[in-house]
Amino acid sequence: MKKRVLYIGADDSNHAGVKKNGEIILATFSFSDRDGAVENFSNRRNPEIVNEWEREAGGDYRFTILTNLDISTGFSNSLVNYEFGSRTSNLPFAVPFLIADFLRTHKGIDQIRLFLDGLIAPQHKEAMSRDFKKLGLELIVEDFPKKRKGEKRQTIKRPYCPRVVYVADYKANYLFEKNFDKISTNKNNVRIPREALICYLNRKKVPLELYNL
């Protein structure tokens, strides 16, 4: 019997030089085998590719908003001026909560293939796979940096990734431009437990039970 594979693309909102407090982390979900294949895309974001994916794969996604928290409880003084946008580990921290939210209503999955936009530290990829294995799920994690070397060792900077990653990049940046208070009521917004945020900001391991799977 053919394995039922879930393909996930995930990205954060790229906002270098933009003065806005906060970060969008977004994941797209698909059972279409096409979304497991790597493709070349233009640097220019194309809404037609997103529309095509929504028609073919169902358009399911989840996101979360990381913003500065009220630090009256649970935080060390060193985190008073912390901004989420300053950490490259935001994506591997937040995306397991988006996956967990999706899995609560989607059962019978044999394998999860998670594709992350950008270069992700090996220890973060290994930690995610290890955590989901403890939860009884096979999770394969791959990253797709935009900069890579071509056949002639030239630097190429353009999306070369599965379609779900391209769509996640588009949607994360689209939502980042919106008012966070307004999009916080979106049904696809996942609120990460406060206890998990406190663990993360204090560089502590997030307990698996907080994924609520």
Image (cartoon, rainbow, N blue to C red):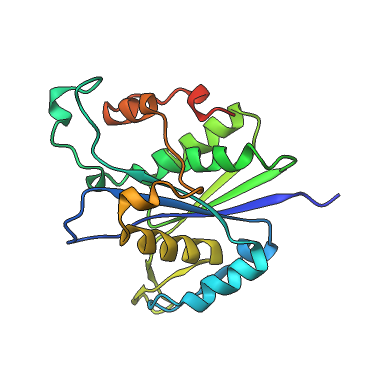
Q: Residue at x 56, y 37 (%)?
A: 100
Q: Residue at x 59, y 74 (%)?
A: 52
Residue closer to the observer: 33 or 70: 70
Residue closer to the observer: 42 or 180: 180
Is 97 on the left or on the right of 197, as rendered? right
Q: Position of residue 66 (x, y in %)?
A: 32, 43
Is 111 on the left or on the right of 59, as rendered? right
Q: Position of residue 181 (x, y in %)?
A: 32, 48
| Image quadrant in which you'd find residue 102 | top right
Is 150 on the left or on the right of 83, as rendered? right
Q: Position of residue 39 (x, y in %)?
A: 54, 72
Q: Residue at x 51, y 52 (%)?
A: 142
| Image quadrant in which you'd find residue 30 | bottom right
Residue closer to the observer: 108 or 2: 108
| 174 vs 90: above or below | below
| 7 vs 89: above or below | below
Q: Residue at x 50, y 43 (%)?
A: 98
| 89 vs 8: above or below | above
For the view shown, which residue lies furthest in the top direction? 74
